[in-house]
Amino acid sequence: MTKVQVITDSTADIPRHLVEELNISIVPLKVHLEGKSYLDGVDIQPQEFYEKLKAATELATTSQPSPIDFVEEYREAAKDGDTDIISIHLSSALSGTYQSALLAQSMVEDEFKVTVIDSKEASYAIGIMVVEVAKAAKEGKSLDECVAIANEIRENIQLYFLVDTLEYLQKGGRIGKASSVVGSLLNIKPILSVSDEGEVTPVDKVRGKNKATARIFETLQEKAPNGARLGAVMYTDNQEEGERWAEKIKKTFGLDEVVLTGIGAVIGTHVGPGAIAVVLVPNRD
């Protein structure tokens, strides 16, 4: 029987125990800081990265994997034969990672089957999709069934995040439609999301972080009137705040488990220290 191998990139910010438990393959992006280059999640972990970022005298930058990086990962995954690959990646509006994966797909198409998916998301909004697909693959679901699961989650996912400053998004060129809130009045906190096109976009502007946080939870309840089946919270250098958000998601939506995960160096380069995010997949109607 043909098995399905799930491959993603390091921007999915999936906790290590889930990567190992579900046999998920990760292709790392790179982060460049103070003259050094690091493989995201391999050479540098989130806590170390944020310490370096806050002390840095220049802006960090990031770069995507090459097509050859993906070809090597695909061939490794398919080496035992009878393997279909589903490769799910960071929004193509935010990175060239998806394009690298597509090029790699074209380079191996005569050898085995690879389906590449643009998540149109970032961080664990990709990860939540990848984890559910990997669970299905582990249960023996077919490639078509796995693709359908990814597409259904992508269509329904709700992602909201706050940043301490828009500076990192702005300087990194990832600000998308959120540019309209640059230079807003003091203490205005934009509530950000990722649009259907995969761009960073503002959904609301609230004065003060506490009110912005409350508004995010109100919005989640509006978007998930029938409850939620999956939830996660992503944090940068503010784990305690992340833990509070995760507990609130559990209580609000009656979830037994909410994944709490650190935002890695590549996504962290663009959102900066102090950023926090929540992702929710509502119950089906």
Image: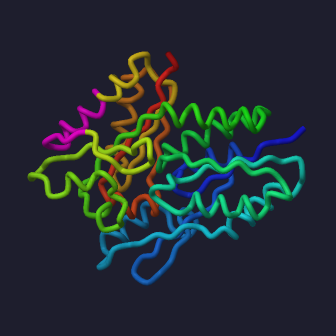
- Is 209 one of the magenta-colored residues? yes
Tell me which residue sits at (37%, 72%) in the image: 52
Tell me which residue sits at (83%, 54%) in the image: 112
Q: Quadrant of the N terminus?
A: top right
Query: In front: 45, or 173?
Result: 173
Tell me which residue sits at (43%, 37%) in the image: 279
Q: Is residue 217 left or right of residue 197?
A: left
Query: In front: 236, or 171?
Result: 171
| Image spot of residue 260 (x, y percent) | 46, 42
Which of the 4 quarters of the picture holds residue 57?
bottom left
Q: Is residue 173 left or right of residue 67?
A: left
| Image spot of residue 207 (x, y percent) | 13, 42
Tell me which residue sits at (55%, 45%) in the image: 127
| Image spot of residue 4 (x, y percent) | 77, 43
The secondary structure that dominates the magenta segment is: helix
Q: Residue furthest bottom?
A: 35
Query: In front: 251, or 263?
Result: 263
Tell me which segment is drawn in magenta. Answer: 204-218
